Image (cartoon, rainbow, N blue to C red):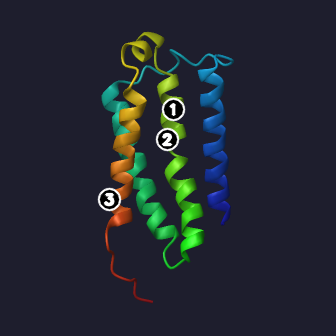
Amino acid sequence: MTRGDAVLLGLFLACWALSLLSFTRIVWLAGSLPLTLYGYYSVAVMLGWGFGILYVRRTWGLPTPIRRRFLLIYYLGPPAILGVLRSMAPYSDQSAAPFVPLYAFGVFSVLFLVPVTMKFPRPMR
């Protein structure tokens, strides 16, 4: 694990903790970022595609057990950012559309799996 991976893991854990604190209403984030659904799903697309490519490039040539560990970081980490962004939406928007985070995770998953399942040629050295 490189320093960049450790920084990403720390960011994702912090976002998951903030999402949990917001869900339990210890920290009130609702209304601090009025992001439209179009913008929210655009962030889900960018995170899915970007971290899918980053996962493929980062795990190129690594053994399978190590790749599985990185899959946990790169697949389950970025949805924490989506959770924080959704908890920052106005409360009326959150209650009007409760399944938006689930759909955003689906969008993220599909776009994450596109580069992961593609066969790329080996890089020349």
Q: Could you tell me residue 124's position as x and y percent? A: 40, 88
Indicate the quadrant where residue 101 lies: top left
Q: Nearer the viewer, residue 82 or 31?
A: 82
Q: Position of residue 33 (x, y in %)?
A: 48, 22
Residue name at image x 54 percent, y 30 percent: 84
Q: Report the Cα–Cα distance between label 2 and label 3.
A: 17 Å
Q: Residues within 10 Å of mark 1 (few under 14, many from 20)?
A: many
Disc 2 and disc 1: Cα gap in Å?
Answer: 6 Å
Q: CA distance from mark 3 to mark 1?
A: 22 Å
First in sequence: mark 3 vs mark 1: 1
Quadrant (top left/top right/bottom left/bottom right) for the N terminus: bottom right
Give SS at disc 3: helix
* Residue type indicated by callout 2: Pro
Q: Are marks 2 and 1 in contact (CB under 8 Å)?
A: yes
Of mark 2 and mark 3, the one earlier in the sequence is 2
Which x, y percent locates residue 121?
Answer: 33, 81
> Which residue of the protein is positioned furthest toward the front in this rendering?
65
Q: Position of residue 74 (x, y in %)?
A: 52, 55
Q: Is residue 87 above or below residue 63?
A: above
Q: Residue furthest top?
A: 92
Circle 2/circle 3 CB separation < 8 Å: no
Is 6 on the left-hand or right-hand side of 36? right
| Amino acid at circle 3 | Val
Q: Is residue 89 left or right of residue 6?
A: left
Name the residue beneath numbered marker 2: 79
Which residue type carries mark 1?
A: Gly
Residue where numbered disc 3 is placed: 114
Residue at the image point whose x is 52% and y is 23% from the top:
87
| SS for dot 1 | helix
Q: Which mark is residue 83?
A: 1
Q: Residue at coordinates 54% horizontally, 73% vertically from top-left?
A: 64
